[in-house]
Amino acid sequence: MAPPANRDIIETAFEDWAAGHRSFYDLCAADASITIMGQSRLSGTLSKDAFLRERARPFMARFSTPIVPANWQIWVDEDDVIARWDSHAIASDGKPYNNSYAFFITMKDGRAMSLTMFLDMSAFEDVWNRCQP
C-alpha cells in the first residue's frame, strides 16, 4: 500500500479514537503482534487477543474516563509508520494519568500487522498497581 494511504488510515484511526468511535487496536489485524517495550513485568510481545485480554482491557478498566490520543504526529515510510501521541485520562481513584507514546507500526493491506509501543512504563504501572479493574 502506498505511503499516503497508510498515513490516511492511521490518521483516521487516531481521529476516530479521539472522538470515541473506536479503539486504535481495531486497526490491528486479527493475527497482529503487539509489543510493549521495556523491562516491566507488563512488557513483552503478545498476540492481539492476548494483548486486549491481558493488558488493554484490564488497564482501561482502571479509569473513570477513557484514554484518548491528543497531539499526534505521524511519519510514514511505505508500510512502516511511526505515530507519536500524548494521552490524558482520569484513573478510577480520581488521579490524572498523563503519558506519551510512540507506536511503531508495520502495515499490510490497510491493517496493522505489528505494533511496537514505547511509553513511560512507570506511569502505566503506577495506575496498574494503584487501581483495581
Image (spheres, helix red, strand yellow):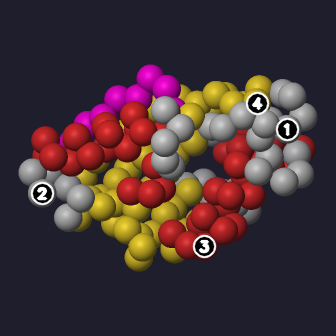
Which residue is disc 2 drawn over? Answer: 1
**Amino acid tagged 2:** Met
Q: Which residues are magenta?
A: 69-77
Side of 62 relative to 3 (left or right) = right
In the image, residue 114 above or below residue 13: below
Q: Amino acid at mark 4?
A: Ile
Out of 100 and 12, give the one closest to the viewer.
Answer: 12
Element on which disc 3 rests = helix
Would you call the spot at circle 3 few (<14 residues within 10 Å), some (14-19), or many (20 or more)?
few
Main SS, magenta region, reads strand
- Amino acid type at mark 1: Ser
Q: Marks 1 and 3: which is nearer the front?
A: 1
101 or 60, nearer to the observer: 60
Determine which residue is flagged by label 1.
Answer: 92
Q: Residue at x 15, y 46 (%)?
A: 5
Instruction: Say what secondary structure mark 1 lies in.
Output: loop
Give left or right: position of 85 versus 129.
left
Residue at horizontal 13 percent and vertical 41 percent from the top:
4
Cα distance in 3D space between marks 1 and 3 = 23 Å
Residue at image point 71% right, 44% down = 124
* Residue assigned mark 4: 90
Q: CA distance from mark 3 to mark 2?
A: 27 Å
Q: Are marks 2 and 4 in contact (CB under 8 Å)?
A: no
Say whether residue 122 is visible.
no
Q: Residue furthest top?
A: 71
**Residue 31 point in image, percent of width and height:** 41, 76
Residue kind at label 3, given as amino acid type: Ala
| Disc 3 + disc 2, Cβ < 8 Å | no
**Which element is circle 4 on?**
strand
Image location of residue 7, percent across then percent down: 22, 41
Q: In the image, which disc is placed on residue 47?
A: none
Above or below, 48 relative to 121: below
